Amino acid sequence: DVVVPEQMEALETLNTAQLELGDREDDYAYQLALSIGSDIYIEFSGIEEKAGYGTNKYAASVRAYETTTSRLLGTETGYSQARKGELMLCVEEAMNDAVDQVLSKITSYWKKDLSQGIQYKLVFNMASDFDEDQIEEIQFVLIDMIENMTNKSKENILTSQTLDYNIWCDPTEYNKSSKVYRRLKKSFKSEDTEGTLRKINVNRKMILLKVDYE
């Protein structure tokens, strides 16, 4: 599905207005989820160049990212033929060339990635009420949980407050981010720690969680 940013902004404004009419508090996590709104984010740029004999050509660069994980899926540059005038035709030709190549790379990336499992971005935030030993104990538990439920994992950041992972899960068990959260919640509850696992936001492939002091 193609998402138009202007339409998503209009929808967000409408939802906010409905909440205000209903005398409800703003749900900022929900608004943030709406602002993401797509699985892939595409950037493009272009430049017109002189090609000799009074003609010009156009070069368009296209970059595609996975929205929730920020992973670069593909980048390509497309070119048009040299022409006199007809700038918009040159722009269209160059963009079509670049987009076709990028879409091919996205397809290849997904096929390769799915062989490892579905990828999710997983971030835990630790409450400041824990002491250093408690934080380490909880983080060890979380790391073991991640290892036990994933096909593959990549540790990005580990600090006293944040645990940041990319994980790849079996698509037959975890085809939704809510199922990943449910498994983590259930597993953490069975562990003997002084923390409680709660969600901040679960949106497509991004899962933001927090560990509160009991």
Image (cartoon, rainbow, N blue to C red):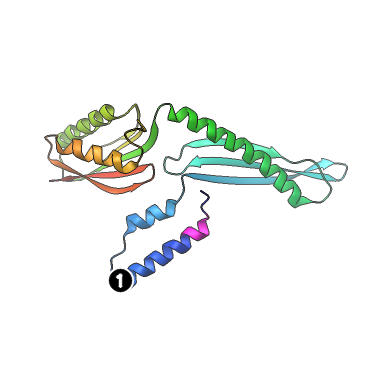
Q: Which residue is mark 1?
A: 22
Secondary structure state at the residue bearing disc 1: loop
The quadrant holding residue 157 is top left
Task: State how many labels appear.
Answer: 1
Residue at the spot x=24%, y=37% of the render? 183
Spot occupied by residue 166 in the image (x, y as percentages of width and height): 36, 34
Viewer-side residue, 182 vs 93: 182
Tell me the kind of residue under disc 1. Gly
Asked if the magenta segment contains residue 24, the reply would be no
| Magenta extent | 4-8
Label 1 Cα neighbours within 10 Å, binned few <14 / some 14-19 / many ≥20: few
- Image coordinates of residue 170 in percent, x first then y, are 35, 30
Which residue is drawn at the image coordinates 76% and 51% (left, top)? 87
Front residue of this view, candidates 209 and 134:
209
Q: Is 42 drawn above or below residue 73 in the view shown?
A: below
Q: Residue at x 42, y 62 (%)?
A: 12
Residue 72: give x, y in percent of width and height.
50, 36
68 horizontally vs 59: left or right: left
Q: Quadrant of residue 63?
A: top right
Q: Residue 34: x and y, percent? A: 41, 55
Residue 24 left/right relative to 51: left
Compared across the picture, whether 186 is left or right of 100 comes to left
Q: 10 or 129: which is nearer to us?
A: 10
